[in-house]
Image (cartoon, rainbow, N blue to C red):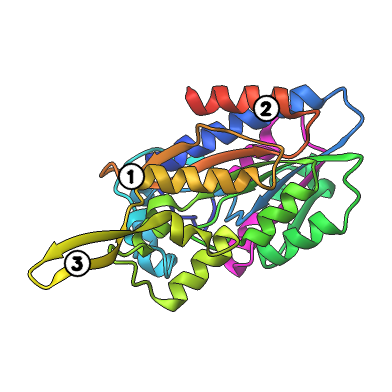
Amino acid sequence: MPTTPHLFGGDWTAEKLNMVKRYLASYTTALKNQPFRTAYIDAFAGTGYHTPRRQAKSTGPVQASLPGIPPELLEKDSQEFIDGSARIALQVEPRFHKYIFIENNPGRFAELEKLKDEFPDKRNDIALEPADANAYLQDLCYNRNWKTRRAVLFLDPYGMQVEWKTIQAIGETKAIDLWILFPLGMAVNRMLTKDGEIDDTWRRKLDIMFGDAGWYDEFYKESVSHDLFGVKTQLKKVANFDSIGQYFVRRLKTVFYQVAENPRPLYNSRNVPLFMLCFAVGNAKGAPIAMRIANYILQS
């Protein structure tokens, strides 16, 4: 048990981890007789553990442990202690050749270091990177030879930290299968005001995440009304959870060979879709089996 738990999420967290776990086991099995070097890459890797809020009451206020995390993420859903994505990947058999865990928070990075002692047989194959995830991943994608390598990458941010430039770099490797948690209701929908008057800082964040400003014309349309003073034209938000999610899937399709059409919304205890778990594959040859596995997991 880690001394500094990673307090994050409720039942939806267990749901996303279970789906990723199922895919990793199928992935390594499918590639075990192939000549590629395989890697599991985990950005925002956390501590390697996920501990529900119920079990962490003795450690102090959750807000103090996770400054800046929206209250929707600090759920009251009760569940047992479960493994985080880093430990899940290390437990998968057949194993990966390499494990890359990226975590810029010193406390959580220190917990990740303990994984080398817990998995001594994989110690030399675990790379821990105390780096900015976007900068590290862009360098990794553009400055490695991917012809003989394949990887599964899990992008699991707390919010809108993932830049479109990073997603584009991942797709251009044509060698990485991507699972990404898109902040559907937790961040994006909250920023979309009803009248289209969006703070400049928020607009820049949305531009960086989507890769351009095209989202605005997708999510807002002119509305014409009549009153005593004549015709009145104003912008109106037409986006909802479904259309926002569909737009992100279309954006993924511009840089990946194939993208799952049925991403999984992840709901909190109040039935609000906080995130959407999406899957995309970069390699044309491996796409049919990858999509078959991912679609089955997302639908089940």
Q: Secondary structure at mark 3?
A: strand
Residue linked to disc 3: 231
* Mark 1 residue type: Asn
Range shown magenta? 84-112
Closer to the camera in the image, 164 or 218: 218
What crowding class fits label 1: few (fewer than 14 Cα within 10 Å), some (14-19), or many (20 or more)? many
Q: Is residue 297 left or right of residue 70?
A: right
Q: Which numbered dot is residue 25?
A: 2
Element at label 2: helix
Q: Would you place residue 46 above or below residue 259 in this image?
A: below
Q: Residue 288: x percent and y percent? A: 71, 23
CB-based contact (under 8 Å), mark 3 and mark 2? no
Lower position in the chain sequence, tag 3 or tag 1: 3
Could you give the CA–CA distance between mark 3 and mark 1, rounded to whole angstroms? 42 Å
- In contact (CB < 8 Å): disc 3 and disc 1: no
For label 1, the residue is 268
Mark 2: amino acid: Ala
